Image: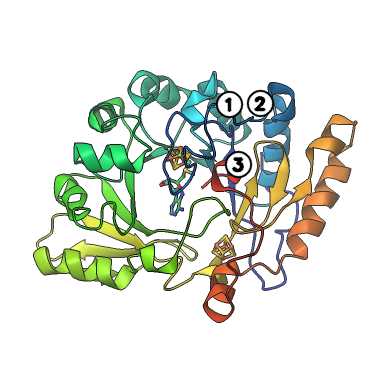
Amino acid sequence: MKKTHTQLKDKFSRYLRDIRISVTDRCNYRCPYCMPEEIYGEKYSFLNRKEILNFEEILRLLRIFVQFGVDKVRITGGEPLVRQDIDKLVAGIREINDELDIALTTNGYLLKQKALKLKQAGLSRITVSLDSIDDFTYTKMNGGKYGPAKTLSAIQELDKIGFKKTKINVVVQKGFNDQNFIDVAEYFRDTNKIVRFIEFMDVGNKNNWEKDKVIPASKIFEIINEKYPISPISNNYLGEVANRYKYDDGKGEIGIISSISQPFCQNCTRGRLSTDGKFITCLFASGGVDIKSPLRSGATDEELIEIIKSSWTSRIDKYSEDRLITSAKNKKKVEMYYIGG
Ligand code: SAM
Ligand code: SF4
Ligand code: SF4
């Protein structure tokens, strides 16, 4: 399907290029920085089946987004691999357009058994979250659930299956992995995997975020550069979230994502579709526009287009930049697993 509508521009002239879909609010991990166990325990009530968008609904919305020039779709969550038949969703998205960049972010626990099907369905790329390769640290960072062995072994299979440009996400958090995050860089040096270190972010209101728990990008750079000298390289495209660095000895590259210390709202082209069908224009928004209700009460494509259009064209989000000026700590925000990281 070709772009048939004029690209949508927000109030700061940022186009909508990239859609992230949270396909489930559930997860098999309980990372304290995302879904702390004390809140998301056994009694927590997740969305029920009827409340979440089904695949047909997601695909209908994606067809519209693509008409507006969206060329990148990221499937995320929660843990997207706990959603049944996720490869069928991938296949449906691939049918929309051959050239779409379709990526998926996962904690990797269930990846080994699903990677081949995902590849066959047309998934372009995978990002695997792996905060540490040390057993104790990794387990602590996912709420005491599992060690890193299954995720590491799934990552090793990805090349054989034919996945290229695999990225590894590492959230760096004081008191958790600040002493040993460099081990992940070391482990993937001289492989074709790109490790990206992410500053601990104040997403949602439930992860006990404090500024002094953030290891700033400058410190992450310093620690890696001291052992393995790195130099900045230019971005692949405007709006890329990570600052890129190459190892001076030619052993690959890493990225650092500095949402807290050096925000990148200026070029933010990302829209999000929540698990229950809200269109959300910023990771730190307090809500979004409900598309599921009109979708389920017979809205035409034109009506859905109007909802998306009016939401994006009135967008003024730049939360990360504003955070530097005002303390937005008490602002109500949607949780990350529900809108997709
Ligand atoms: N469950 C999948 C996973 O962990 O890869 C996908 C969803 S998760 C919300 C997407 C990404 O957001 C992961 O890489 C995760 O580490 C990151 N993330 C979650 N909470 C974060 C926080 N408070 N600060 C920075 N990154 C965070
Ligand atoms: Fe689950 Fe991913 Fe959130 Fe961890 S970061 S709790 S794996 S959704
Ligand atoms: Fe985009 Fe909002 Fe993040 Fe800024 S804070 S980069 S506008 S998602």
Q: Is 268 or 33 nearer to us in this picture?
A: 33
Q: Tag on residue 338?
A: 3
Circle 1 residue: 89
> Disc 2 or disc 3, which is closer to the eye?
3
Q: Is residue 100 visible?
A: no
Q: Where residue 128 sits in the image (x, y, percent)?
A: 36, 39
Q: CA distance from mark 1 to mark 2?
A: 6 Å
For badge 3, the amino acid type reads Tyr
State which tag comes first along the sequence, 2 or 3: 2
Q: Residues within 10 Å of mark 1 (few under 14, many from 20)?
A: many
Task: Indicate yes or no: mark 2 CB to ligand 1 under 8 Å.
Answer: no
**Residue 327 in sight from this viewpoint:** yes
Q: Tell me residue 210's x, y (percent).
A: 45, 64
Residue 237 position, x and y percent, is: 44, 62
Question: Hey, what amino acid is under mark 1?
Answer: Leu
- Classify mark 2: helix, strand or loop: helix
Q: Residue at x 29, y 31 (%)?
A: 151
Query: First in sequence: mark 1 or mark 3?
Result: 1
Please indicate whether residue 4 sits to the left or right of residue 138 in the image: right
Q: Amino acid at mark 2?
A: Phe
Q: Is residue 276 above or below residue 19?
A: above
What SS does tag 1 mark?
Answer: helix
Look at the numbered discs 1 and 3 and tell me whether their residues touch, using CB distance below 8 Å. no
In what element is the residue under mark 3?
Answer: helix
Between 190 and 142, which is closer to the camera in this rendering?
142
Residues packed near mark 3 inside 10 Å, few (<14), some (14 to 19) or many (20 plus)? many
Quadrant for the N terminus in the image = top right
Q: Earlier in the sequence, mark 1 or mark 2?
A: 2
Circles 1 and 2, Cβ within 8 Å, touching? The answer is yes
Q: Residue furthest bottom?
A: 325
The dot on residue 336 is none
